[in-house]
Amino acid sequence: MNAILEKTTIKFLVIMVLLISLMACSENRTYKESLAIPSADIDESYEGVRQTDDYALKSEVGMNQVPEDLKIIKSASARYKVKSVKTTTRKIKRIAQKYGAYISDLRFENNLYQKENRFTIKIPQQHFDVMMDSIGLMVDFVEYENITTKDVTEEYIDIQTRLKTKMEVKTRYESILRENAITIEDILATEDKLRIIQEEIESAQGRLKYLTNKVSYSTIQIDLYETVAYKEEPESYSKTFLAKGKEGLSSGWNIIETLILGLIYIWPLTLIGMVLVVVFRKKFRKREV
């Protein structure tokens, strides 16, 4: 009886161990599968984000590309605070010379509160951004900085087209003047039309040249200033001895000049007076004799 009970117990334990092993394997397999799915999701989502970002960047680059045939007029105006107006102005001049630019309309002001220097830079358009960035590195504070662009491509193309048409019309009028104009009236009428069309051509060429120059050279208006320690303006000024001596010498010389010029202006009276003196002296001598 005991042997049968022991065999039954052993079979039961074996069956329990096998069931527990099967359950453990099943749990392990489920755990691995559950991990594999999130891993795949993460990888796929990462690739999706990376591809989306690359596409967005390429799209932005494509949109920011500016055609070379566009005619853009660039200009800027800025006001900066600097440590030294003179030093910064000198550095800006050197940078301007480096990039083929020049400075115009310079005006310097100095008062009780600050020193200020205003000037305009004319710079080739391709160096506009580099110039602005270089100036920005030398300042302590940016009060304002305005950059504007104006697209004149449409006007530029329109003037070119009109100019080409006017040149063709001028050529036809010249041909008429050489070949078909016989009477004086025909010649004068054709020459008058040629004069009008020539004026229109010159006007169009002038406008085209103006736009070309404005596109080629950008304008940057710079206002530099530095603050100085406030000093009260003195109520009165006392002159030094040297200044007084200079004024005395100048006044004395002015008096001499005035006397000499006065004698020159009244030389007839001086001459008459000298003659009268000589006559009276002779009369007095005769009476004494």
Image (cartoon, helix red, strand yellow):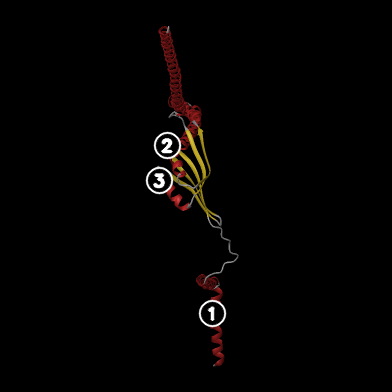
Front residue of this view, candidates 102 and 273: 102
Up-down: is 27 above or below 281?
above
Q: Is mark 2 on a helix, strand or loop?
A: helix
Quadrant location, the N terminus = top left
Q: How many marks?
A: 3
Residue at mark 2: 126
Residue at mark 3: 97
Residue at mark 1: 274
Can residue 49 be seen from the camera position used here? Answer: yes
* Distance of label 3 from label 2 (alpha carbons): 14 Å
First in sequence, mark 1 or 3: give its number. 3
Comparing marks 1 and 2, which lies closer to the viewer? 2
Residue 55 placement: quadrant? top left
First in sequence, mark 3 or 2: give its number. 3
Name the amino acid type tagged 3: Gln
First in sequence, mark 1 or 2: give its number. 2
Residues tagged 1 and 3 counted as in contact (Cβ below 8 A): no
Q: What element carries label 3?
A: helix
Residue 28 placement: quadrant? top left
Name the amino acid type tagged 1: Met
Seen at 41% across and 45% down, the residue is: 95
Up-down: is 138 above or below 198?
below
**Which residue is situated farthest in the bottom direction here?**
289
Up-down: is 221 above or below 252?
above
Q: Where is residue 22 in the image (x, y as percent from the top left)?
A: 42, 12
Comparing marks 1 and 3, which lies closer to the viewer? 3
Q: Is mark 1 on a helix, strand or loop?
A: helix
Q: Where is residue 201 in the image (x, y as percent from the top left)?
A: 48, 32
Seen at 55% across and 90% down, the residue is: 286
Up-down: is 110 above or below 72?
below
Q: In this view, does 272 lie to the left or right of 102?
A: right
Q: How crowded is mark 1: few (under 14 residues within 10 Å), some or many (20 or more)?
A: few
